[in-house]
Every structure is written in structure tokens, then in C-alpha cells.
Image (cartoon, rainbow, N blue to C red):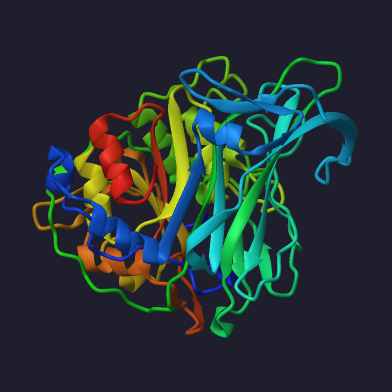
Amino acid sequence: MSRAEQPSRRTVLAAAVAAAVAGAASPAAAADGATDTADTDRAQRRLVDNRFWTTYADWRGGSAKGARAVAGPRPGVVIGAAAGSVDYTDPHTGKTAAWEYATWTSPVHELAVPSTEAIASWNAHTPDGTWLQVELKGTYSDGTDTPWYVMGRWAAGDEDIRRTSVDDQTDDKSSIWTDTFAVDDPATGLRLTSYRLRLTLYRKPGTKKTPTVWRLGAMGSDIPDRFTVPASTPGLAQELIVPRYSQEIHAGQYPEYDNGGEAWCSPTSSQMIIEYWGGRLTPEQLAWVDPTYADPQVCHAARYTFDHQYAGCGNWPFNAAYAATFKDLQGVVTRLGSLTDLETLIAAGIPAITSQSFLKEELTGAGYGTSGHLMTVIGFTADGDVIANDPASPDDEAVRRVYKRAEWEKIWLRTKRYNAGGKVVSGTGGVCYLYFPAKPTARQCKALAAVGVR
């Protein structure tokens, strides 16, 4: 998303977005394993419900047509014997091609939090000649069902299909806004109470290639509208060493990807954390980038997170899926409840990408306002202020910033705000990308569980 204070397609999202409440386990206790996370979990469940299918038992527990579960160190689901074939006309190229397909459908998940919003995310390997589609079908609190909503059509590459969200999906009770299911009018009391996810795997006919999906799930959430949030109490002074990349040095580069680097905060943030975990691109992968451009990996991240319908690189699940294309990494989209949650993660060595919107005067030292911007939180000062790698900086060296704790917490967690024109618009309500190892340490697992991610 762009750092500029300008209208964003995300501002049409329902304002009733969710965040988990403050009160997560203290970072020190989470680090030494002494904390009982039961209270934290109960608080989380009141506002956020994460359900991910990741284990062999999970994949065996779904219903499959042509798909099969595979065991091993990283269990998943693949095409076994294709269930059939279908023609797909790519709306962004106009090309029609035949594809074999197989489907896997999750069991019904009863939401612990009857939700106003839901965001799916997935981790997968899609070799050339393959791609996948994720759909969601839910039941409302009035007993009626949603249609099957397309939450994304995705491939790691962009030669077979164009990676895309799908617009104009609604049943007059809910709608899909790029990557987010949203109840149209939360004030009516209508909520999503359960859902299933359907995964369709595609490959070129006559081949043995297959996508492999290791993680599939969704985050459901519900929180009342709020312009402000209670400030959390500082509990950690620690900084992680995370690579620093500026989006601004890419301004004007590859304008076909959302007008170039000025709008690349999301992929730039993603690339920082991917490289923190050791993810690297090869010279062959970067060969398409103009050799005169600095930090070519940022250009690559922009290209391979780009949503051709949204016409931007800020599709949240597409960023998480991109991160998981790197060896031994996984990524999810969730919502957190406070900076205490981020302290819990930082204490375990896990940085996070947060989404926020604000006027210039609302974040001291930023020097800009934004209708939607992603930053990487890498630590906290002794006073509890936020240390962030802010890609909206003039160069890589200037990326590390320190922002006031209370200001940051407000602009990140609120669900309503006033824009520069004085109009009430929505905030992201604690949206966060978390990237972490495929095999987290016990300490990391504990920290992730404390914020509702397993």
C-alpha cells in the first residue's frame, strides 16, 4: 500500500474489524516457559478465532475429490488422481486453457468468535504448470448460508495464470473486499458462526505435477467500533536485527506493479522478515530485474505478491503465501490485541508486519500520513516505544525508526478514524503478518500459541 494519504480500496472494508484484547502473557514468562496461557487464550477467543489445517490428521479429516493427504516432515495435500478437467479463462490475459483439478474441503469449523470478518491464508508449493484456488462457505447466525466465496486464485509464479482476487462477490448480507470476508452491516447483529474452506488444486492435463498445500486456514474476528484503545504497559526492551529496505528507492521502477516502489510497503516489509529468517533469492531468480537497481529482491517481492485484480502488492494472504515459498518458512495473517502481544513474539525472536493508517500529526516522527501502510516491528526501547523498520524512508539506512508506544498502539488497533478530509473511515484493527520457521522451536511455539496461532 502507498504511504500517501489517499483513498485506498481497503477503506471500503466494514469498520467492524477485529483485534485481540490486551493482556497476553508477559514476554519474559513466555520466554522461560513459566506462563500459563489459559487466561490469554480465553481473552483471545472472545475476539479472534484462528483455525489452520496443517497436520496429516487434519488433511485426512477433510473430504477429498481427487486430492490426497501426504505425510512426512511437512504434511500436506496434493492431487492424486484428478477429479476432472475445466477450462479457465484468465480475466487478466484473456487466455483460455484446460486444467485438471482435484478438491479438498475442510470439515465445518464452528467459530468460537461469531465474526464480522474472516481472512483466509495458505502456504503452498506450486510448480510451473500448477495453481490453486481457495474458497470459503459459511453459515450466519440467522441459520442461512453464504455462497462459496473465492478468497484467492494463486500461484507462486505468474506465467500460467495471473494471481488474483475476485471482485463483486456478495449475497446482500456479506461481501468479499479483496482478501477479506465482511458482514455488510454488523450493527444488525448478523455474524458468521461457522465456515468450511475448499481448496481446488489445478495442473496442466497429462502431467504428474501437483501443487502441495501445507497450511490452510482462516482468521475470524469481531470487535466493536473504536477510535482509540487502552494503552498497554511496557514489558520488554529488546531489538531484533532485521535487514532494512526502503521502498522509496524503488519509486518509478516497474510501474506495472502498482506504479512502482512508492506503493511497495507490503512486499518490502515481507522481504525484510524473509531475509531475517535466512530466505534468499538466487541470481537466476533475480535475473529479470534491471541490474542497475539496488535491492533487486524488493522488486522481485513486489512482482510475486502482486494481485492483478486489486492492482496492488498489499493483498495480505498473497504476502503470507509469498513468504512460504522460501524454504522452511510459513506465514499467516491474523489480528493481535496489543503491543504486549508483539512483545511476546519479539521475546521469542519473531518480528511482525503490522498494518496501520494515520494522519501525519498522529505518528510523531513519521513525516507523512497514510490510508494504509505496512511496517516491520523489530523491538522495543527501554521506555517501551516501538522500534520499527519503516519502508517509507528515503534510503535503507534511514529505515530504522522509533515511534511512541501509545501513538503506535492507537493507529494500529483502532477500527475507525478520521481521514484528512474529516470523514470517518475504517482502520485495520490489529492486522498482522507473522512469518516463522516451518519447525518453530518450543519457545517460538509457545509465543505463537499465546497470540492464537498454531
Look at the picture and state if 11 lies above or below 263: below
Q: Position of residue 432 (x, y in %)?
A: 41, 52
* Residue for point 10% across, 58% down: 383
Between 306 and 248, which is closer to the camera in this rendering? 306
Q: Is residue 228 left or right of residue 255?
A: left
* Residue for point 55% across, 59% down: 118
Q: Is residue 146 left or right of residue 111?
A: right
Return the residue found at the far left.
382
Q: Quarter-wise, where is residue 45 in the image?
A: bottom left
Between 38 and 344, which is closer to the camera in this rendering? 38
Label total for image:
0
Q: Position of residue 52 (x, y in %)?
A: 50, 43
* Residue for point 52% across, 15% down: 283
**In the rendered image, which quarter contains the C terminus?**
top left
Between 307 and 101, which is closer to the camera in this rendering? 101
Q: Position of residue 386 (x, y in %)?
A: 22, 55
Look at the picture and state if 387 lies above or below 338: above
* Residue for point 50% across, 18% down: 72
Q: Is residue 179 visible?
A: no
Q: Position of residue 209 (x, y in %)?
A: 73, 18
Look at the picture and state if 53 lies above or below 225: above
Q: Quarter-wise, where is residue 302 in the image?
A: top right
Q: Is residue 43 visible?
A: yes
Q: Is residue 354 left or right of residue 349?
A: right
Look at the picture and state if 439 lies above or below 187: above
